[in-house]
Amino acid sequence: MVRWVKRLAAVGNGILIFALFYHGHTRVAIIGGLLNLAWAVDEWFPSDIRRFLRPWALVINTAFLAYGALNGRPSMLALFLAGNSLLAWNAGLFVERWSDAPLTIQYQYLRRVGTLTVLGLLAGVSAVTSQGNFALFFLPVLFLMLVAGFLWLRLISRTLKEDPG
Amino acid sequence: MNMTRAWSLVTSLCLILLLAGLLLKNGILLAVVLPYLLFSLIPFWRRTEEPHLIIERRLEPQYLWGGQPCRMTLSIQNVGNDLEEISLADVLPAGLRVEGDLTYHGMLQAGQTEKLLSTGRGVRGKYEFSGVKVSTNDLLGMYRHEKFVPSVGTLAVLPAMERLERLKISPRRTRVYAGVIRSRESGAGVEFFGTRAYVPGDPLRHLNWKAGARWDLLITNLFEQERVADIGIILDARSVVEVTADGESLFEHSVRAAASLAEHFLREGNRVGLLIYGTMIEWTFPGYGKQQRVRILAALAKAELGEHAVFKELEHLPTRLFPSESQIVLVSPLLRGDVPMLRYLHALGYRALVISPDPIAFEKRSLPQDECAALAEGIARMERNATLSKLRRASVNVVEWDVTTPLRIPMKQAMVGVKRWSVG
């Protein structure tokens, strides 16, 4: 069941990317759509390619949505692409790790990942709809940037230290 | 608790989007961060408890012969809370070939017990099981808890043995119990020992009528008592004497010979001890019977070649471990420098028997058949013969053994025409 959720989510990503870039960036739309269609059927690929494709598909989808957001594309589509990509990526991760999970566990997983995705999307939608009411000042922005940069560097250094390969 | 690579990826994307949104002052990017942020915060929201497991290992049998399978059962019981996803991997000792379930992946509810069944086979050696690697993670795969649960067990693959025929050994001192080794004392026995004048009470059927007619006296025959003896087997495990050919080790044949001798002497009721002389001194205290057989075979199962400056020569052999005037059996390919120590043993009153696997014949099989090899073999053979001659002149009994033949054959040949191996 989770496998089908992942497939549907990946196909949904393709459709969202296509919709996001169809006007003006047709090539990007086609490439993004094909990539996600390949992701939807990645069980047919050798495991090395599958393992390589899964994280990179998430990264590329994130790059697409960031590009779309910066180019003034519909923000809701970008937001749904983010949620859908995370869902497809995590479902793929689960299937790879535990392909023969019992149905109760699959339900439990879907409930958990579904709650998280819906919560994220709702928070994002709320933020998008209310963004006009925010007035971001320089100092809070600088503070947030420094905190984010520090956390990211710490994360990278810890990851490299724990798993150099 | 450790974050997984998946968590690192999603958190990295979250922070990159956050930085880009702040740098470019783009509200959409900041809004898009939120789903990523929720996935990143999962490990801080739901924390898993440390798994509490009871893991028991059963090996049946614990001692086995080479090629014989061992049934291994690993029983895992969860005595803590429900575990959504758990992975278990048995940490196997090197060299053991195992078929069956070695890993478990799935859920483990409170009180649930899982069993992993497998079959192990191995070559001679002692295999120590240390424990099981346990890894629990959340269903989203964002964090992981790793733990090593000890679950010890020892499996010994015993050395191969061959059945030897009766060996005539004659230590200077025997023990008081009846056995099959001649004790140099008259008494109840079957081998003729001598004659003396008849005294009342001697059994009439032992009268030597021919000697009586000759001396005009009543003469009675004496028989040699047969008793058990103390036998110390020394296995030479020095790296310097090791020879390998075609991936085969001469040491393995030495181990086989030591096991066969121990089995033989114990079967005859003797008290047998074992000393493995290599990296260190491994001493199996002398004893009788089946339990001693198991002790010696277990010691031989874990015997390994060793290199130590102190034990490079035989001169540091701890002779005091062996009862005085007992029989010592050395299993060694022998070096030229070993002769003085064996002479010294003889001088101390021990009876020494050397079983020497032939390293030259063993190595020759893997060498090309050319003039150089023949010349080298000739020189090595001369040197070895000289060493063995020195030993024989020092009243040390030597059995030279080409390991391609069963040990009983050179043992039998060495006894032909020899009433007793040791002389006076």
Image: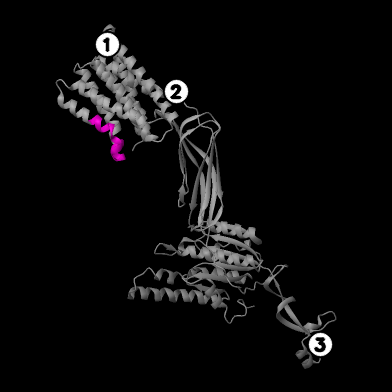
Does the rendering let one see residue B337? yes
Secondary structure mostly seen in magenta is helix
Around disc 3, counting alpha carbons within 10 Å, would you say few (fewer than 14), some (14 to 19), or many (20 or more)?
some
Q: Residue B406: within the magenta? A: no
Camera-side residue of A64 and B312: A64
SS state under label 3: loop
Reply above or below: B36 against B234: above
Three-letter amino acid code at the position of disc 2: Arg
The residue marked by circle 1 belongs to what chain? A
User: For this rendering, which residue is in front, B282 or B315?
Assistant: B282
Q: Which residue is mark 3?
A: B218
Residue B277 shown left or right of residue A102 in the figure: right
* Percent coordinates x, y for residue B293 in the rendering: 61, 60
Residue linked to disc 2: B46
Which contiguous range is marked in magenta? A35-51
Relative to A82, say whether B265 is above or below: below
Q: At 78% across and 89% down in the image, what residue appears?
A: B209
Q: Are marks 3 and 2 in contact (CB under 8 Å)?
A: no
Instruction: In the rendered structure, find residue A138 and report the number of the disc placed on it.
Output: 1
Q: Amino acid at mark 3?
A: Leu
Q: Is residue B81 above or below residue B105?
A: above
